[in-house]
Amino acid sequence: MKHKDIHLEFRGDIAIVRLNRPAKRNALSDELINAVRTVFETLPDTVRAAVLDGEGEHFCAGLDLSELKERDAGQGMHHSRMWHAALECVQYGPVPVIAALHGAVVGGGLELASACHIRVADETAFYALPEGSRGIFVGGGGAVRIPRLIGAARMADMMLTGRVYNAQDGERIGFAQYLVPAGKATEKALELAERVAQNAPLTNFALMHALPRIAEQPADQGFLTESLMAAIAQSDPEAKTRVRAFLDGKAAKVKRG
Ligand code: 1HE
């Protein structure tokens, strides 16, 4: 798939998806958000993990505000649903996605990052939800995904007061799981992607598709779903091979962190 605002590259079984609209700080036009959707819908089945990053000084400036024309309520709802559909393709697509963040991670850019499975930020990253001061609301799934990362109270504060979190505080409160020196986010994300790509495919499926849903289920339903997923994963020949390798002393032990 070729699109003028996305650079797509393959390194072995890793896909690197780069937002490539630096002159507009990778602002997400309707065209670009739909291209993100198409990329994740059409990844070749040889791909085992993906890295998502942004060209230029910033990861992403959010919604392309130049397209925020007069919309009536129905059009506004459909526009938001279009974003939901695109970001669902990232979260519930074929492979885990590792976001490599730097510079502005704001508005819809933060919503996009929140749909990824792992976030690596460099020291230049900053997080904001300027929707609050622009008189609008999040519409790309942020009201669902962001409270799950940082809590509803912190999200409300960001939108009510325009609070901006720097990279260190962003890691502390849960936006990013990894914080690396400036310019190193993509390198670290690639290192993690290579590790993720070595997992049994069913393990990655379980973590992407079962875990977030189990976490939202009432406990008694969650325990049952977990047991079904566990039974499916452990009956896979790949699991048996890996467990046997450990018992035969041929697989790596867990090392101290
Ligand atoms: C844009 C956008 C954009 C930059 N839509 N064109 N998001 C925001 O409210 C964030 C708005 N952007 C900014 O605050 C800043 O641009 C940044 C902090 C991200 C970067 O600052 P800087 O100094 O590096 O760049 P700049 O000079 O502000 O912008 C460069 C160009 O990109 C300029 O256009 P030019 O033609 O004058 O060169 C900007 O107009 C353009 N640009 N950001 C359109 N967002 C599903 S709902 C989600 C709702 C939201 O995401 S609302 C939050 C939107």
Image (tube, rainbow, N blue to C red):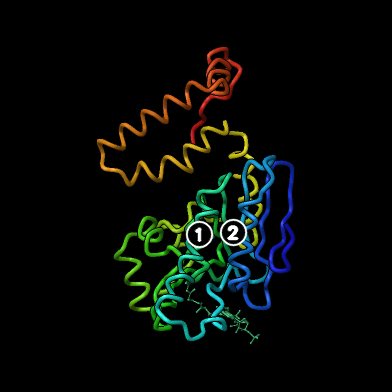
SS for dot 2: helix
Vertical arrangement, residue 213 with respect to residue 69, above or below: above
Amino acid identity at mark 2: Arg
Q: Amino acid at mark 1?
A: Ala
Which residue lies most toward the front here? 74
On screen, residue 50 versus residue 153, left or right, reads: right
In the drawing, does residue 22 fall left or right of residue 172? right
Q: Position of residue 95 (x, y in %)?
A: 58, 44
- Residue 14 quadrant: top right
- The residue wearing badge 1 is 85
- The answer to the question of whether label 2 and label 1 lie on touching residues, with beta carbons closer than 8 A, is yes
Residue at numbered disc 2: 37
Judged left or right of residue 126, residue 1 is right
Q: Name the quadrant where ligand 1 sits.
A: bottom right
Numbered disc 1: secondary structure: helix
Q: Which residue appears at 55% of the width and 63% of the height?
A: 123
Question: In the rendered image of this protein, does residue 122 appear above or below residue 12?
Answer: below
Residue 196 at x, y = what percent? Answer: 58, 40
Q: Which numbered disc covers residue 195?
A: none
Q: Position of residue 33 (x, y in %)?
A: 58, 66
Distance between the Cα atoms at labels 2 and 1?
8 Å
Q: Residue at x 46, y 69 (%)?
A: 80
Work out whether mark 2 precedes mark 1 in sequence or the reverse, and give the earlier one: 2
Q: Residue at x 61, y 17 (%)?
A: 250
